[in-house]
Structure formats: C-alpha cells, structure tokens
C-alpha cells in the first residue's frame, strides 16, 4: 500500500541540510522558541498544534478539533478541516506537509493567506516544525481527496517519505506526538486542567468551533466537549457563573465593530461584587498586560458613564465625575480584537501596541454602549446605582484613611500591641509570622529566633474582604494590626518600599479552618496589597501533619502520601504522630518544623495563587475545598527547603 511520492532524490537531500540546521537551533535553545522547557513550554506544544486547526476553523473549513492525552503523555490532535496540502512544493521539491514539519517558520505560510487572520501572532507563533523538533517522535496523518497519507519523524527528522496508507472517507489532519524527555527534563506530564482552561478559552474566542479534550491516561476516560455559539458573551456568562456571582442584568452586553482590517468585540456584564475582571486578547492571544485595546475600552466606558449619567440625571450637577475604578467595580469584561499585523510589546510580549486599535475600540464602545443604555433604561439604572455606590464608598474610604492617619499622627505610629517584634531593623533580613490564634501565637513567640523573626497573633472574626470595600478595612480590628505591622499602607497608596519584613508568612493549621485563614489573608493581600504578592514577599509556612520517629531518627511529613512513603522508608517500628494543630506543638517543635530557616518547608505565593484564592472564595465558604493543599500541590515547584 505504501507508495513513494515522485520527487527527485537530490532535492530531498538539499532541503534536509536546511532542516538539520533549523532543528539543531531549536534543540540547542528550545527556550528561545517555546519560552521555557518547563511545564509552560510543554503545554505550549499542544497550543502550537491546535492553533493550526483553529486557523483552519477561522478560514471556515473546520468545526471540530479533538485533543487527546494518551497514556504516556502522548498528545493527539485531530481536526475535520481540508487536510494539510500534500502537493510538491516547487522550491524545495518536497510535499507541503513535509515542509510544515521540517522547515523552521514555515507554519501555515504556504498556499497563500487564506485564513483571514493569522492567529499565530503571539508570544511564540513558531509552528509545527518546532513541536516536531522537540518531540521524541511525531506522526502526521492527512485525509484529503479520498486518500489518507502519513509521515513520521524522530526528533524532527523524517523517518521516511510521505506515504499513502489507504483510502479516506473524510478530510482532516491528525498529528500525534510525544514530547522529548531530553528536552523537557523537568517533566513531560500533561495537566488536564491547564489544557482544559486554555482550550475552553480557545472555544470561547472562536464561536461555534467545537473543541473536545479527552484524557485517556487514567482508569476512567475523562472528556469535556466545548462549543460556545455566543463566543465571548458565553465567556463572560461562564466567568460570572463560575464565581457564583449575582449579576445585575441578565443579558451580557455584546459590542462589535470593524474598521479596515481590524475587528473588535467586547462583552461585559456587571455583578454585585467589588471586583473587576478584564480579560483581553489580540488574535486569540491573551494580553495580560493590556495595551491599546484595553485602554480604548476603559476610556470609552468612563466617558459614556459620565456623559450618559449627567444627561439622564444619574450624576447630579454638584457630584464629581465617576472614576474608572467606580465604573469598573463588579465588572466582568472580555475584549477580543483581530488584526493582520498585531504588535506585541513589553518584556513578555503580553501587551498590544497597535495604536489604531485604541481609537477603534474607544469609538466603537462609546457609540454602541451609549446606544445600548438608551435602549435599556432598566439595565442603565442598575449599572448607575452600582457605580454611584462605588463612588460613595471611595469617598468613605478616603475619610476613614484620613481618620486613621490623623490618629496615628497623634500616637506617633505605634505598632500593634500584640506584635512581638524582632531586634533586627533591616527589612531584607527579617520575617514576620502572622499566626491565627493566641495559643499558637504564644508557642511561636517562645520558639522564634527573636533576632530576625516577628510574631503577630491574630484573633477574632476575620473580615470577609470579598464582601467589603476599602472603607471597611480601615478600622477593622483584625486586619489593621497587619497593615500597621507591615508598614506599607493600603489600596492605591500602598507602598511596598516601606515593607518592614521581606518575608511575610501566613501560619495556620493544616486543616480546613487553617485553609480558610490562608485564603482570607491571601484574598486580603490580593485585593488591597497586590504588590506584596507580586514582589514575592508572601509565603505560607507549612506545619507538618505527621511526625515519624524510630529511635533517634525523627522525620516530618506534610501529606498522607508523604507519610506513607517515609514510613515505608524508615521501616518497622516507626512511630507515627499526627499533629492536631499548631497550638498543640510546643515551642521547640514549632521552631524545628515550621520556623527554622534550616529545616522548614515553605511555599512562596504567586499572583496566580492569590487570584485563585480570590476565585475560590465563594466555593470555599461552603467548605468544599481545601485551597491550601491546592496551592501547595500547584506550587510544589516553588516549595523549597528554605536555606
Ligand atoms: F501545522 C500542523 F501541522 F501542526 C497542523 C496543521 C496540525 C493540525 C492538527 C492541523 C493542521 C491543519 C492545517 N489543519 N488544517 C490545515 N489546513 C491547511 O493546512 C490548509 C488546507 C488547505 C489549503 C488550501 O489552500 O487548499 C490551505 C491550507 C493552509
């Protein structure tokens, strides 16, 4: 059945030289092509392949993309498009599909620009050849013109020519690959949830395209099939529902505009929370640092709200204008722009730079949103009530802050009474442990290294910051001691350069209550002291769950699994002790297991973790999840022995 394609041998050789040079470059510096060889780069391989199918869908020839994670972390991507062309390329004398997989930067460039928008404009739009070069093996199957073709590769080099393997009843492309463990030395294990989140995003951004993710690695096959006719409106709906938000108006507001070759779409909906969530994309690539599309949206939203609000009397003559923060409180918004030549700026290329986009988005949003508000007075009323409340709260917060300032000016900024400070004054050398409960706080005070470690015990009912604005934090008897001890202030005037300790530990029990404390604290930092997390100053101190002893040999375990493993390692006669809580440990134990920089295991909190805490919040209150374990698992890579 296999059949050689009829191309002259010497031209095949000629192209192979180019191929080998390209491959060598990719395998020598994989990070240059996919960002990292850690988990991010590993997952990036999948997006890189899927993006080609998305292009085919955008061109209008494909409506189903299947991604399978097979045993052994082998990835298979199948689409029902036209199939990658197999005709011989005149320049190189080899089939187009072979070019796609072997020539660097050849992805999608052949056959003319027929996909409308080039999606592969993002951080590393590098194409299939890079994935091929970084795969132990890769196989492509193309179904086209009633024939199925296949070709396979090892570490980017073709095993043999493209061959016909039989008839095909349908059209499409299937690519199967195994990431090369020589390249991804950290791990080649795929995370189902990471792929699911990104693929869901892709299916929101490409309305009507069905993406099915299947995990075949476990005993039971796990599958999710996603197709959203509403596109980014469905995205906004989903984000509100996932956070269990009460929305202020039932329908998502969807605005669309086009100018020349730029297409802009915005979907937004308000909820009754105090958070703002704004996601933006350019050519389906996430732009977490914003850029011209976000700027255009923000200016237009503020301007519409003030113009329309004055016109309709929602804002009185004597009132100040609403600020950007006022009109974005409780807003969930997704912005998607598509353009032929997207320019990505900044260190991580995560910011859109095209200036034409700013004016298109702001003009479009201003005009269309004003029209919407005119036509939907009920929705307009709800949104204005929300923004007006936000403005009042901002004013109240200012007054509360001034009050605190005046008071502390009189009291010469005294530290909280419960704070057991350290002797060292150089913040780069010091640590603070925020400890829940007086008994644990007592042990921590006695066990600490008082040269460099400060202890701040907290007690009383924690303010649910998710349900509170800044004005409630000022004067809160549980949170204000934290603010004072850290020394940086709050909110917009937070100044991380005044931080009094460069390691801020949250120390709580390893149970559900302790998890609540951690989550509440992280949510508080996330909402009101974000630079603290961004600067990498926040850690979770991890008290062990188990003590294992066999004679003089004493070891600690931080999870059930670890306990079983260590217990097996230590052998017969091992005594296992389960700690019920921090309060139960004596000062020496607490020092040895949790506070001693030479022994302790700590978790540094990233902004994503804090964001997750913020999101997890509503679920958390139902006691369904133990978020801290999740942080720790997700952050196993950061969970370092702190020496
Ligand atoms: F790039 C790739 F190899 F990684 C890859 C490409 C992987 C997967 C899973 C799918 C694809 C792909 C490519 N799906 N569909 C296409 N379509 C084309 O390459 C194609 C088909 C027909 C024509 C034409 O002009 O007739 C042009 C193109 C670009």
Image (cartoon, rainbow, N blue to C red):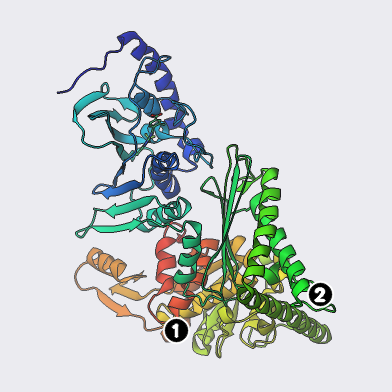
Q: Is residue 527 above or below residue 57?
A: below
Q: Residue shown at 44%/78% (left/top)?
A: 620
Disc 2 residue crowd, few under 14, some 14–19, many 20+, Cα 10 Å: few
Tell me residue 503's x, y (percent): 59, 67
Q: Residue shown at 36%/11% (left/top)?
A: 11
Q: Which mark is residue 573?
A: none
Q: Which mark is residue 320?
A: 2
Name of the residue lying farthest toward the bottom: 460
Query: Counting residues from the N terminus, which is met first, the one under dot 2 or under dot 1?
Result: 2
Judging depth in this view, the residue of 623 and 566 nearest the camera is: 623
Q: Is residue 296 above or below residue 50?
A: below
Name of the residue lying farthest toward the front: 375
CA gap between label 2 and label 1 equals 57 Å
Quadrant assignment for the N terminus: top left
**Depth-wise, is mark 2 or mark 1 nearer the camera?**
2
| Residue 318 left/right relative to 491 | right
| Residue 510 left/right relative to 387 | left
Q: Is residue 616 above or below residue 268?
A: below
Count of numbered circles on the image: 2
Q: Residue shown at 36%/81% (left/top)?
A: 579
Q: Quadrant of residue 512?
A: bottom left
Tell me residue 380's x, y (percent): 65, 73
Is label 1's Cβ within 8 Å of ligand 1? no
Q: Is residue 294 visible?
A: yes
Judging depth in this view, the residue of 227 and 389 nearest the camera is: 227
Q: Is residue 500 visible?
A: no
Q: Which structural element holds mark 2?
A: loop
Q: Quadrant of ligand 1?
A: top left
Residue to which mark 1 is pinned: 586
């Amino acid at each position: 059945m296999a059949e050689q394609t009829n191309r002259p041998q010497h031209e095949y050789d000629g192209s192979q030289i180019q191929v080998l040079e390209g491959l060598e470059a990719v395998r020598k510096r994989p990070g240059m092509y996919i960002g990292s060889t850690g988990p991010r780069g590993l997952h990036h391989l999948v997006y890189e392949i899927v993006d080609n199918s998305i292009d085919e869908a955008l061109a209008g020839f494909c409506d189903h993309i299947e991604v399978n994670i097979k045993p052994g972390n082998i990835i298979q991507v199948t689409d029902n498009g036209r199939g990658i062309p197999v005709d011989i390329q005149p320049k190189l004398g080899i089939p187009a599909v072979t070019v796609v997989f072997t020539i660097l930067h050849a992805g999608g460039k052949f056959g003319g620009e027929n996909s409308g928008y080039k999606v592969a404009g993002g951080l590393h739009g590098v194409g299939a050849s890079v994935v091929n070069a970084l795969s132990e093996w890769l196989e492509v199957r193309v179904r086209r013109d009633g024939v199925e073709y296949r070709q396979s590769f090892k570490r980017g080099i073709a095993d043999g020519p493209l061959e016909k393997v039989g008839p095909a009843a349908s059209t499409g492309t299937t690519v199967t690959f195994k990431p090369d463990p020589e390249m991804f030395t950290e791990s080649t294990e795929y995370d189902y949830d990471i792929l699911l989140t990104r693929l869901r995003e892709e299916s929101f951004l490409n309305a009507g395209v069905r993406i099915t993710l299947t995990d075949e690695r476990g005993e039971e096959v796990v599958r999710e099939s996603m197709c959203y006719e509403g596109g980014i409106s469905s995205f906004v709906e989903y984000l509100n529902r996932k956070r269990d938000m009460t929305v202020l108006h039932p329908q998502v507001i969807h605005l669309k505009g086009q100018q020349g070759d730029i297409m802009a779409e915005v979907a937004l909906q308000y909820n009754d929370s105090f958070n703002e969530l704004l996601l933006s994309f350019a050519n389906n690539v996430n732009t977490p640092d914003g850029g011209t599309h976000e700027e255009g949206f923000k200016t237009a939203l503020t301007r519409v709200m003030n113009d329309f609000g004055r016109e309709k009397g929602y804002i009185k003559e004597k009132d100040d204008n609403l600020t950007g923060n006022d009109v974005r409180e409780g807003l969930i918004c997704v912005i998607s722009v598509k353009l032929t030549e997207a320019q990505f700026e900044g260190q991580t290329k995560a910011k859109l730079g095209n200036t034409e986009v700013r004016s298109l988005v702001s003009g479009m949003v201003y005009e269309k949103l004003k029209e919407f508000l005119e036509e939907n007075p009920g929705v307009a009323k709800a949104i204005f009530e929300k923004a007006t409340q936000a403005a009042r709260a901002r004013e109240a917060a200012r007054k509360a802050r001034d009050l605190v300032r005046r008071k502390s000016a009189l009291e010469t900024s005294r530290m909280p009474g419960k704070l057991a400070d350290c002797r060292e004054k150089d913040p780069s050398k010091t640590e603070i442990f925020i400890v829940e409960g007086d008994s644990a706080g007592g042990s921590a005070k006695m066990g600490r290294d008082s040269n460099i470690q400060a202890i701040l015990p907290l007690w009383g009912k924690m303010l649910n910051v998710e349900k509170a604005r800044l004005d409630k934090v000022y004067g809160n008897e549980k949170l204000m001691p934290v603010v004072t001890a850290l020394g940086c202030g709050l909110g917009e005037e937070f100044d991380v350069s005044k931080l009094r300790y460069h390691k801020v530990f949250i120390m709580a029990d390893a149970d559900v209550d302790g998890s609540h404390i951690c989550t509440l604290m992280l949510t508080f930092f996330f909402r009101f002291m974000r630079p603290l997390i961004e600067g990498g100053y926040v850690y979770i101190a991890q008290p062990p769950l188990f003590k294992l002893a066999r004679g003089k040999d004493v070891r600690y375990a931080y999870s059930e699994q670890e306990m079983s493993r260590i217990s097996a390692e230590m052998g017969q006669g091992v005594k296992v002790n389960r700690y019920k809580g921090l309060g139960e440990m004596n000062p020496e134990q607490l020092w040895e297991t949790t506070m001693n920089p030479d022994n302790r295991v700590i978790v540094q909190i990233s902004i994503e973790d804090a964001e997750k805490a913020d999101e997890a919040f509503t679920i958390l209150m139902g006691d369904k999840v133990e978020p801290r374990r999740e942080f720790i698992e997700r952050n196993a890579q950061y969970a370092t022995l702190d020496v």
